[in-house]
Image (cartoon, rainbow, N blue to C red):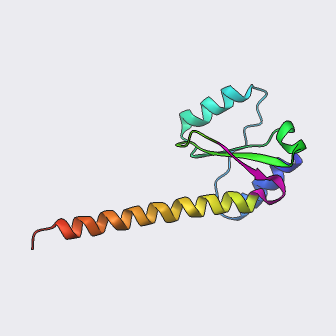
Amino acid sequence: MEQVLALESSLTAAGLDVLVDDRDQRPGVKFKDADLIGIPLRVVIGERGLKEGKIEVKWRTQSEAKQVDAATAAEAILAEIEAARRGHDEACQERRQARAAAKPS
């Protein structure tokens, strides 16, 4: 729990909304609930991963999870979010330009 609270504190300080699911449920139940309420990025901190120094990060829209170093997890998560924001901004800009080019003069 120490690692969870430290990561939560770092991400909250960076301005992110963080939901810690510390219920005594199996992971599948927690994952299903996170999908149902629309959590876009899931971070899994488990005993097995921590033994290897890893934390799992998975976007809801992707099929595969990434393993990031536990020591630098906050930075890795913030980088993931920033990359997603840049990608979203670029896609919006491209759509705007396409609409502007398609408008009749």
Per the image, is 53 magenta? no
- Is 99 located above or below residue 21 in the figure? below
Q: Which residue does the image show at 86% across and 38% down from the upper left?
A: 47
Q: Position of residue 53 (x, y in %)?
A: 86, 49
In this image, 34 relative to 67: left or right? left
- Is 59 located above or below residue 82 in the figure? above
Q: Which residue does the image show at 74% across and 25% down from the upper left?
A: 26
User: Which residue appears farthest toward the bottom when viewing the image?
Assistant: 105
Q: Which residue does the image show at 82% across and 50% down from the upper left?
A: 5
Magenta-drawn segment: 65-73
Tell how many labels: 0
Q: Quadrant of residue 28?
A: top right
In this image, 22 relative to 47: left or right? left
Q: Does residue 97 appear anywhere in the picture?
A: yes
Q: Does residue 12 appear anywhere in the picture?
A: no
Per the image, is 72 magenta? yes
- Residue nearest the viewer, comparing 7 with 52: 52
Q: Quadrant of residue 58?
A: top right
Q: Position of residue 24 (x, y in %)?
A: 79, 27
- Is 32 located above or below residue 21 in the figure? above
Q: Which part of the image, by quadrant, shows the N terminus?
A: top right
User: Which residue appears farthest toward the left when viewing the image?
Assistant: 105
In this image, 33 relative to 70: left or right? left
Q: Which part of the image, by quadrant, shows the C terminus?
A: bottom left
- Residue nearest the viewer, comparing 17 with 60: 60
Q: Which residue does the image show at 60% across and 59% down from the upper left?
A: 81
